[in-house]
Image (cartoon, grey):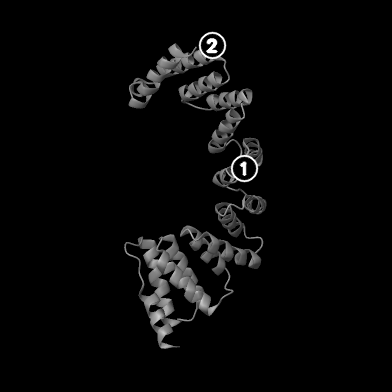
Amino acid sequence: MSRRTNLFVLALLSATPAGAHPEIQDALDRLTTALATTPNEASLYLERGELYARHEDWPSAEANYLRAAELAPRLPRLALARGSLSLARGQVSAARAFLDQAIALAPSDPTALILRARALARLGLTPDALTDYTQAFALLATPSPELYLERAALFASPADALRSLADAFVRLGPVMSLQLRALDLEVALRRFDDALARVDLLTSASERRELWLKRRGDILVSAGRHAEARAAYVAAQTAIAALPAWLVASPDTVRLSTELTRLATTTP
């Protein structure tokens, strides 16, 4: 081992993030001990780099990944880890290159596909990003609602974005964050009847009906149905009156009640 490499390894072995969480610090101590015995074990550098990345200690994570790459350039998970790190650091082109490598080594890795989709989206390569999201969703048993929202946000057309959520409702059911996004899209498309039907569904399932009744009134105003809007605002006030006294007196509820009074009296 050259003197330069030896110094580099010693620096890696002694690196410790300030204020690391106890469970992460314990794992780092274990890996540092193992590396003192087997300093050429690439998988240990990769594992330690991943721990540093979890702690957002980017320089230490990169140093460990570089050492792992020197020892075993095709080490499983290494390209994925380096791509994830580059993306977190805003090095989007580098992230895309690493993630291309990761997917070439493991084409059915949904994590790599999702990360590359994010990189491609940030590079303005929207069609390619959408392809990666769709492929990843086919590989995941239950994609998270957040992933569906990420994909929907890439569509320039609200109609396309709304259609992209259809699979989410089939696979995940009426998740609130997805319902809210679909509602916004329906209003943007002036599909007011669909939006009102969605609000009615959300109202029936909610213990705080006043918020949804106000939303119903707002949609009716956008639709030009002012008499129905006023009725919705009055219904929201009635729902507030039925709440426990401590809730009626809360600052948020007082502000909402004041706003409803204004809307009910000023809506044409």
Dot 1, crowdedness within 10 Å: few (<14), some or many (≥20)?
A: some
Asked whether the residues under the numbered discs 2 and 1 touch, taking CB atoms below 8 Å apart as contact, a structural biologist would say: no
Q: Quadrant of residue 256?
A: top left
Residue 209 pos. (x, y %): 48, 23
Numbered circles on residues, count: 2
Q: Which residue is mark 2?
A: 227
Q: Amino acid at mark 1?
A: Phe
Q: Which mark is residue 18?
A: none
The N terminus sits in image quarter:
bottom left
Q: Is residue 243 visible?
A: no
Give the mark nearest the N terminus, 2 or 1: 1
Q: Disc 2 to disc 1, how far (Cα)?
A: 35 Å
Q: Which residue is mark 1?
A: 155
Q: Residue drawn at (63%, 41%), measured in percent from left and top?
A: 168
The answer to which of 86 and 216 lies nearer the viewer is 86
Q: Amino acid at mark 2?
A: Ala
Residue 231 pos. (x, y %): 51, 13
Residue 166 pos. (x, y %): 66, 38
